[in-house]
Image (spheres, grey):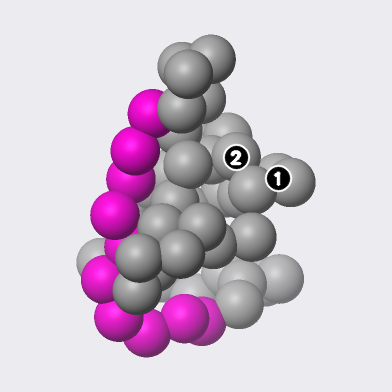
Amino acid sequence: MCILDIDDGIITGYHQFNAEEPMVEWVGGVMELRNDECGNIIAYRNGARFI
């Protein structure tokens, strides 16, 4: 499991989940990470862009 830092739909950072953190929204399932045309990393869940 990992924690994704998402700002306006773009992943700005990520790290391994080691302990509880404040301000975390827990979302189950699998996220697919893709690069967009500008090189930003975007998260998709169930085939749709996750914002």
Element under label 1? strand
In three-dimensional space, the C-alpha distance between marks 2 and 1, rounded to whole angstroms, equals: 5 Å
Q: Residue at x 71, y 71 (%)?
A: 23
Q: Is 31 a magenta residue?
A: yes
> Dot 1 corresponds to which residue?
7
Q: Residue at x 64, y 48 (%)?
A: 9
Question: Residue 44 vs residue 50: left or right?
Answer: left
Q: Which amino acid does label 2 sit on?
A: Ile
Q: Residue at x 57, y 49 (%)?
A: 5
Q: Is residue 21 above or below residue 26?
A: above
The span picked out in magenta is 26-35
- Front in this rendered view, residue 35 or 11: 35
> Dot 2 corresponds to which residue?
10
Q: Looking at the rendering, in which quadrant would you find the C terminus?
A: bottom right
Residue 17 shows in the view: no
- Front in this rendered view, residue 41 or 15: 41
